[in-house]
Image (cartoon, rainbow, N blue to C red):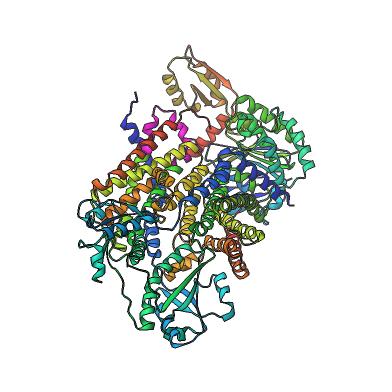
């Protein structure tokens, strides 16, 4: 193999892996983060603070109240005072349910039972979900079993019947961590050489542009792949995320993604004059990328003009790939189309790096 | 080999033209900001000239300077080895840049480590080496591929005097072997050791000659040094300045250098007040530099 | 006994200001970036799902089945499509082309009109996207009711009617929730980045050593370095505030004075964290990596921005307490949407204050005067 390439690989690996702080950041922290975030985040809404106001003598109401707290959805909050509005306003409760003073049983009998629900709607999603929980439980307040209606919607949830949000989120977190690590690893590499002065030594030798650029890319792809394996292991082992697709699909997808992010990092460092600009560039890429990866918000909901930007985000494609391979076995169409897009991005950024990279100091 | 050069770069190097012979130690002398580093970097292909051209070892920069870079070694003013790598790793990287085979690398590192007298173990991190050794190591890395021509930019900056002497011994060694060395410096004593010196100021070449010639040409008249020896020389200096036989009076550290017409030399020498000493001295490069730089000002 | 001379801190601050002014990137970063990103993402993010694609495989093709699909479409939440190849409808789920498949059996219409029988329609949902799925599930009861009513002409009686009053955000505008959260994340992260790089850079190019050779004390250096960035951070807050109020019409019910005070504390926390990072790493590259790692993901994922803290395992209720954005999130949302005052926010405010003190102390202590690398 090309001697210069070899030399670059050895040098970058030696420099990167020698510093124990770097080793921690590259290998330990991602695992730690994987663990932390994987366990922490979920999209399930639960443990909402609910206070139920009812006449103390109303036995039916009391039974209903217990039903509210029996699942994980609501936490008990004592109904203090007689102003449910104040309770929610103060933040001591997320929701307050007011059962008519005449008693639940009598209201039901009159077929005009109206129950008031006061919700803290600052988080609109949470409020909607809370409302749907409450109405579900209220529906059980009728006496006697529910006669089947003439029409019923029979719902089955595929791929993730238990609706574990970790199955959904973990691939997303994995991609975010991987993206972050590779970008910050590579985006400063070229500018660091320029700032230190070692860039001069490199360009004083008769080298082709591709030798230098490739020499900076390959070592980080190697490190990135190592990280990928670690993160994948952590993600799948710790979180019961199924691995329904073949391993080679996973590794191929990860490889293409790592190559793409590394080339983006190299591009950033090529066009930056110093490390501070590199940092700005990385931030400008990573922040929108993580927000628009589809993990945190639905990308399809975004206005059409903005969706275009989302389509330029490599993270989005990798998340799709990961989810599809892990949960659905890796459908060929999905696999190759997404990998194709990522490859296209890698090629485009590499071409751009080539154009902007000059072996001169001015 | 004759290097023909017409070279111009407005801001830093202003229409610089010169030629260097093979086997020479050619020095660029000048204050900081005079344009020496820019000149060197352009010659090595690290900078693009705005106007003009250069040929080094008969080669130009048409192919991006690749052929040229293969025949040339460069050592930058800033320390250019990686201080988070070991000695061996740095050499190995430099060899990789030049595509040297492992056997050549092994042989050359043996030779070079002996040449510079490296005693530290080869797996030491460069960061832990002393300043002088680091510079010599950088030199070794620069000549790893045995180039005919070597460009050294202020190679002894920040290095102890003893190490400086050692370093210049190495440079002379190289030229004895037939290499051409082009070096920049702002140390006068180093400039003395060059075959020829190009004096630069504000990007312009203001003189080009061997040290001896420079001194002769700049100081055809006798140069006297006044040592006031603790007394106040002002009166005497004023007298001298009014003396038509005195061409120039320059402060020189705590002393003064007086240029006189040879015809007036005797008279001036005998006019020195008691307790001070006035004697003839051979002109130094420093004098030359001051005269020429001052000359430009006037 | 620490002798603290404000004059020395002030001269350091002045020098820092001059540096900043000469460096357009820092100013752009602090002022422009949060503004642009808040506008961009405030506009982009919308939690209300609409036009969710469902594929309907209609084996009945009767008037009833058509009415059913109309009900789905009319709700605005769904967009009904038909499979390209009826026998391969499941593949569309695999291929991410649809979020769910609605299967209408051939005898649907007939069963509906037969009394006492329940006509069932199967809906297969792609559970991979958990939040989409739960959104769909939350829309279904309404659809079921509407479908039952229209298809059979009967109106079901709800045992208990629920009258809901949504406080603070009666229109359920998800942007009101997202924008203050976004602002929190951005300002927090940028505060960290601002200081992390600057001090690390001075270590790298040696000017820190120069500074330390003077009689200046570490605390003075720290105060001097942080002050100009506080001003910059507040500038960024101002722009974000304008974007939120004017661009997205997020209401502001609380006290501006309290908000500014809280902003100050939050920015200080970020700046101190950045300073601590730069003092510890002394290298720009490591400083940036550590800032991004400790700043970006935790702030996005663990601060309560999108993923509610109550839904996290109990361990995290305590763990997230060490994240300044978590507290400021509560404060920002409280002040903007709920008009919360010091009384309600005393907890988060105190937490921020504690964090400020802890981080500043840690940074000062760690600021070793010895010059080992």
Magenta region includes residue A45? no
Q: Quadrant of residue C174?
A: bottom left
In the rendered image, residue B100, in percent from the top left (x then y), is placed at 75, 45
Instruction: In the displayed orientation, state which residue is furthest to the top.
Output: B275
Instruction: In the displayed orientation, state which residue is furthest to the front.
Output: A144
Magenta region includes residue C205? yes
Query: Which region of the structure is painted magenta?
Result: C197-225
Q: Quadrant of residue B124?
A: top right
Q: Is residue A2 visible?
A: yes
Towards the viewer: C84 or C46: C84
A26 above or below C149? above
In the rendered image, residue B56, in percent from the top left (x then y), is placed at 69, 48
In the rendered image, residue C27, in percent from the top left (x then y), is placed at 39, 50
Residue lying at 37% horizontally and 58% vertically, measured from the top left: C38
B45 above or below C82? above
C148 above or below B117? below
Give the prevailing secondary structure in the magenta stretch.
helix
| Left or right of A261 on screen, residue C362 | left
A24 above or below A121? above
Residue lying at 51% horizontally and 20% vertically, measured from the top left: B226
Q: Quadrant of residue B139?
A: top right
| Left or right of B295 on screen, residue B185 | right
User: Total label count?
Assistant: 0
Quadrant into which the N terminus of chain B falls: top right
Towards the viewer: A238 or A77: A77
| Left or right of C367 on screen, residue A266 | right
Towards the viewer: B132 or A213: A213
Q: Is residue B211 visible?
A: no
């Amino acid at each position: 193999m090309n001697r210069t390439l070899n030399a670059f690989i050895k040098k970058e690996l030696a420099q990167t892996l020698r510093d124990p702080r770097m080793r921690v950041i590259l290998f330990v922290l991602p695992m730690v983060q994987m663990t932390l975030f994987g366990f922490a985040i979920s999209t399930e809404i639960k443990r909402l603070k609910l206070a139920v106001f009812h006449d103390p003598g109303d036995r039916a109401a009391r039974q209903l109240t217990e039903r509210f707290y029996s699942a994980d959805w609501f936490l008990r909050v004592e109904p203090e005072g007689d102003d449910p509005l104040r309770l929610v306003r103060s933040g001591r409760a997320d929701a307050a349910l007011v059962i008519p003073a005449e008693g639940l049983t009598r209201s039901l009998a009159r077929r005009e039972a109206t129950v008031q629900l006061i919700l803290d709607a600052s988080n609109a999603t949470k409020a909607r979900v809370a409302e749907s929980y409450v109405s579900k439980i209220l529906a059980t307040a009728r006496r006697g079993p529910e006669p089947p209606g003439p029409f019923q919607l029979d719902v089955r949830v595929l791929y993730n019947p238990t609706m574990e949000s970790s199955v959904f989120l973990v691939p997303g977190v994995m991609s975010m961590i991987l993206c972050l690590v590779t970008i910050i690893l590579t985006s400063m590499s070229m500018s660091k050489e320029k700032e230190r002065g070692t860039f001069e030594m490199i360009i004083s030798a008769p080298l082709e542009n591709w030798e230098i650029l490739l020499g900076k890319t390959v070592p980080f792809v190697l490190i990135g792949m190592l990280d990928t394996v670690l993160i994948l292991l952590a993600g799948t082992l710790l979180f019961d995320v199924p691995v329904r697709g073949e391993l080679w699909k996973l590794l191929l997808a990860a490889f293409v993604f790592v190559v793409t992010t590394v080339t983006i990092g190299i591009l950033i460092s090529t066009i930056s004059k110093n490390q501070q600009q590199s940092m700005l560039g990385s931030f400008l890429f990573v922040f929108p990328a993580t927000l628009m990866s589809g993990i945190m918000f639905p990308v399809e909901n975004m206005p059409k003009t903005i969706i275009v930007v989302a389509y330029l985000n490599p993270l989005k494609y990798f998340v799709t790939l990961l989810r599809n391979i892990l949960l659905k076995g890796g459908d060929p169409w999905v696999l190759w189309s997404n990998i194709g897009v990522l490859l296209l991005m890698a090629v485009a950024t590499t071409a751009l790096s080539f154009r902007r990279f000059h072996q001169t100091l001015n | 080999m004759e290097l023909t050069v017409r070279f111009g770069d407005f801001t830093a190097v202003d229409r610089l033209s010169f030629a260097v012979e093979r086997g020479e130690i050619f020095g660029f002398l000048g204050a900081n900001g005079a344009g020496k580093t820019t000149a060197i970097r352009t010659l090595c292909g690290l900078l693009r000239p705005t106007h003009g051209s250069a040929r080094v070892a008969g080669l130009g920069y048409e192919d991006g300077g690749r052929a040229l870079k293969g025949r040339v070694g460069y050592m930058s003013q800033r320390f250019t080895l990686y201080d988070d790598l070991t000695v061996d790793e740095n050499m190995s990287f430099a060899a990789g840049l030049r595509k040297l085979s492992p056997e050549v690398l092994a042989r050359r590192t043996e030779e070079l480590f002996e040449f510079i007298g490296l005693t530290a173990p080869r797996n030491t991190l460069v960061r832990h080496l002393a300043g002088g050794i680091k510079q010599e190591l950088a030199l070794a890395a620069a000549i790893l591929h045995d180039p005919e021509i070597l460009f050294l930019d202020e190679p002894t900056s920040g290095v102890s005097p003893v190490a400086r002497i050692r370093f210049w011994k190495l440079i002379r060694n190289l030229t004895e072997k037939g290499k051409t060395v082009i070096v920049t410096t702002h140390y006068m004593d180093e400039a003395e050791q060059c075959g020829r010196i190009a004096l630069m100021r504000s990007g312009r070449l203001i003189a080009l000659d061997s040290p001896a010639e420079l001194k002769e040409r700049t100081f055809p008249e006798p140069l006297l040094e006044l040592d006031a020896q603790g007394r106040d020389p002002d009166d005497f200096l004023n007298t001298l300045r009014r003396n038509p036989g005195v061409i120039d009076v320059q402060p020189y550290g705590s002393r003064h250098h007086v240029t006189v017409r040879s015809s007036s030399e005797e008279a001036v020498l005998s006019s020195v007040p008691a307790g001070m000493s006035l004697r003839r001295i051979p002109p130094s490069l420093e004098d030359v530099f001051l005269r020429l730089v001052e000359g430009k000002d006037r | 006994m620490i002798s603290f001379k404000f004059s020395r801190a002030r001269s350091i601050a002045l020098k820092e200001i001059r540096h900043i002014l000469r460096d357009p990137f820092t100013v752009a970063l602090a002022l422009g970036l949060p503004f642009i990103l808040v506008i961009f993402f405030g506009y982009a993010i919308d939690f209300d799902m609409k036009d969710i694609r469902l594929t309907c495989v209609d084996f009945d093709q009767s008037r009833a089945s058509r009415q059913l699909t109309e009900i789905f479409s009319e709700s605005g939440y769904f967009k009904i499509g038909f499979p390209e190849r009826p026998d391969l409808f499941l593949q569309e789920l695999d291929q991410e082309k649809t979020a769910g498949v609605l299967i209408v059996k051939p005898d649907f219409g007939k069963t509906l009109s037969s009394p006492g029988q329940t006509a069932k329609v199967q809906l297969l949902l792609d559970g991979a996207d958990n939040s989409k799925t739960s959104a769909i599930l939350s829309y279904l009861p309404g659809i079921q009711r509407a479908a039952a009513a229209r298809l059979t002409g009967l109106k079901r009686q709800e045992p208990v009617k629920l009258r809901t009053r949504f406080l603070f955000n009666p229109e359920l505008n998800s942007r009101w929730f997202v924008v203050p959260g976004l602002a929190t994340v951005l300002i927090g992260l940028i505060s960290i980045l601002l200081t992390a790089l600057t001090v690390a850079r001075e270590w790298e190019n040696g000017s820190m050593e120069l500074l330390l050779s003077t009689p200046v004390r570490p605390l003075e250096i720290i105060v001097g370095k942080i002050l100009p960035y506080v001003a910059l951070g507040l500038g960024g807050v101002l722009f974000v505030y304008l974007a939120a109020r004017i661009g997205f019409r997020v209401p502001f019910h609380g006290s501006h004075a309290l908000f500014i005070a809280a902003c100050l504390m939050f920015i200080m926390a970020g700046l101190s964290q950045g300073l601590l990072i730069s003092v510890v790493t002394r290298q720009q590259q490591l400083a940036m990596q550590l800032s991004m790692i400790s700043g970006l993901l935790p702030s996005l994922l663990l601060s309560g921005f999108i993923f509610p803290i109550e839904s996290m395992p109990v361990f995290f209720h305590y763990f997230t307490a060490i994240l300044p954005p978590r507290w400021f999130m509560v404060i920002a949302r409280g002040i903007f949407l709920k008009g919360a005052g010091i009384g309600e926010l005393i907890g988060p405010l105190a937490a921020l204050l504690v964090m400020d003190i802890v981080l500043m102390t840690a940074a000062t202590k760690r600021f070793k005067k010895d010059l080992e690398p």
